[in-house]
Image (spheres, coloured by chain):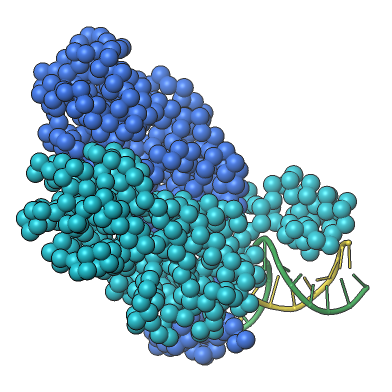
Chain colours: A cyan, B blue, C yellow, D green
Amino acid sequence: MTEAVSRPTLEAVAARAGVSRATVSRVVNGGDGVREPLAERVRRAVEELGYVPNQAARSLVTRRHDAVAVVIAEPESRVFADPFFALQLRGISKELTAHDNQLVLLLTEGRADHARVARYLAGGHVDGALVFSLHLDDPLPGLIRDAGVRTVFGGRPDWGEASGTDGSGRAGAQDRGVVYVDCDNRGGAHTAVRHLVDLGRRRVAHITGALDQTSAVDRLDGYRDVMADVLGESDPRLVVESDFTPAGGERAMRELLGRCPDVDAVFAANDLTALGALRVLRENGRRVPEDVAVVGFDDMVPVAEQTDPPLTTVRQDIEEMGRLMARLLLRGLTDGRVREHPPAGAGYAEGAPGSGVILPTTLIRRASA
Amino acid sequence: MTEAVSRPTLEAVAARAGVSRATVSRVVNGGDGVREPLAERVRRAVEELGYVPNQAARSLVTRRHDAVAVVIAEPESRVFADPFFALQLRGISKELTAHDNQLVLLLTEGRADHARVARYLAGGHVDGALVFSLHLDDPLPGLIRDAGVRTVFGGRPDWGEASGTDGSGRAGAQDRGVVYVDCDNRGGAHTAVRHLVDLGRRRVAHITGALDQTSAVDRLDGYRDVMADVLGESDPRLVVESDFTPAGGERAMRELLGRCPDVDAVFAANDLTALGALRVLRENGRRVPEDVAVVGFDDMVPVAEQTDPPLTTVRQDIEEMGRLMARLLLRGLTDGRVREHPPAGAGYAEGAPGSGVILPTTLIRRASA
DNA sequence: TTGAAAGCGCTAACAA
DNA sequence: TTGTTAGCGCTTTCAA
């Protein structure tokens, strides 16, 4: 068996360049304070030997890993049925790459995996974590905070402040130092429903998302805002609970047609739901948008553009959300004076303790409303 | 500013338990050869202190990382337009998790990222890599092999042996030691087309995928196999090149209807393509399956079940492919006598040098054919 | 500006 | 069975 060729070390480079290890280290890490001719000699040696620093050795002393964990709780396979996370991942990846950080992906399938993830994060393998907390009762966010890892959440966690206007939520000691990125679910819903109302529709229904997710709750709130505004009070039968899936959308639409045959518009919690609703409307001979106008949410382009008719929907920039999450985390990592185990209650970054960043949404008009 | 609380070390645990570091290390790593009462004392100390091993220190000496890179080249955004990779990632994640390995995700956007990825892999940060090589001219696979990292490919790389029956391909020194997992693209296509022929169709067209990917080429080959078999020679006008997207499917279908108005069946390279084709057929008043039967490939359930009519398609178990890739890599890692820089030409695992694992496909009959 | 030397926390010979 | 000891490859004072 051929001898395993071991990678060149700092030592080897130093020997080749005729300098000390310290000097090589300096050059490799930016090269400040090394005279040019020497630095050049070192660089050549690095090149010739194909030297790549051993990250483990480096981490051992610096306590940095240049790696960030992305935690995606995936109790339902729905998560992967739409390209939502893929897009977000792409945004995250771009940003991390630009800052020479690696992306460690932690997918969880259920409770059993929570402990594993918590242990991993507590183990100090990564400099921080980006966490998608999908469900209101998810214990993961809590576990992660206890692990003392710098974290940015994707989507408003349920123990964050209440969405939008009212500040009544059970916000307390809990949400200090919590950072999250979300789109303006409530505002987007508001725009969508407002659009339907402006079209002259008065029997505007809402098919909700899974109400154990803040995004669904916030969209419902946005719907209610407008209905209360415009019509004084909204008919509760116009709201049907669903789950963000096409099948759920179908079911809800059927129920809706049964309950309120006079419905003249539907705001669906997302595009997939709208897809199901459109199908049922067609089955029942309702024309879209003439008889019933439909608006979705997300602007999953491959879906929204392909429906019949093409879907009017609320666009959110998913990739940008990912990017932003990464940027916030990285910034926090750099700013932080104390890198690990931040003292309880320590703010995230000056000026933004416990803050959420909300990205805007835009209405994309196509043919369905 | 509160003092940063540093994590307890082996040393601390040893002190607390009143034993040596070596003993603690033994217990932490399986506990062989430590008498029970002592081991118990150590375990309690670990528990009390909340000790978690420092992976960097461990890697430094063991040269293992318990981490695997997943490289996804993503020159086109199409990659994320369907849930293909998400599913594969899930399978990979499950398998890695089961073996206590972490998943480091490397997404590449183009040439610029190749060097970065190659450097990372060569840097010995991970024990192995799972690589999705999408395009025939992709330099990445070559770079990765040069990096001397144990690798399993997802999808047959173009320098692997030719698919299926004929062995004429330009296989050479290149493909020694190459391991990949793929589904039986050629066989699946064969089944699909055979099914159409058995239905009595004779003017069976094929809308190809992007022909710079082996999967598209193999499916085309499968189509040709049957056509040659059944009809002696196939009409080349029945083959239209496309790109795996719905829009591409539409375009291709239009061209096809123009060229061969008598077409009575279509085998689309994937479900998304079939989706586009169905739409154009409907626009043109062709009934499916009465006038034109349609078969897809992939069985992306959310797509195939929602088409009108529901799509008959060739199913491949995408998640299982991911699982299998991970399993093969992990096995190779364990078997390998030489962990890093395997000598050039060294087989992967005994009995499977340069081998590909092909997963079976099944025809899922729905209404479209 | 450069080098010498002391670890970072852990594993793995080797001794006892 | 347990402990002692020598590094793994790197960064970082501290002296020169």
**In terms of depth relative to the viewer, which is nearer, B121 or A331?**
A331
Quadrant of res A163? bottom left
Q: Which residue is drawn at 41% across and 30% down?
A: B213
Spot occupied by residue B305 in the image (x, y as percentages of width and height): 18, 42
Q: The N terminus of chain A appears in which quarter of the rendering?
A: top right
Q: Is residue B140 visible?
A: yes
Q: In this view, does A141 lie to the left or right of A250?
A: right
**In terms of depth relative to the viewer, which is nearer, B57 or B1?**
B1
Q: Is B73 above or below relative to A182?
A: above
Q: Can residue B103 be seen in this view?
A: no
Spot occupied by residue B320 in the image (x, y as percentages of width and height): 29, 47
Q: Residue at x 10, y 24 (%)?
A: B290
Q: Which residue is drawn at 14% across and 27% down?
A: B288
Spot occupied by residue A42 in the image (x, y as percentages of width and height): 80, 52
**In terms of depth relative to the viewer, which is nearer, A141 or D13?**
A141
**In terms of depth relative to the viewer, which is nearer, A2 or A181?**
A181
Q: Residue at x 13, y 46 (%)?
A: A280
Quadrant of res B82? top left
Tally the numbered discs: 0
Q: Is A301 above or below relative to B197?
A: below
Q: In this view, does B147 lie to the left or right of B336?
A: right
Spot occupied by residue B120 in the image (x, y as percentages of width and height): 58, 51
Q: Is B276 above or below relative to A317?
A: above
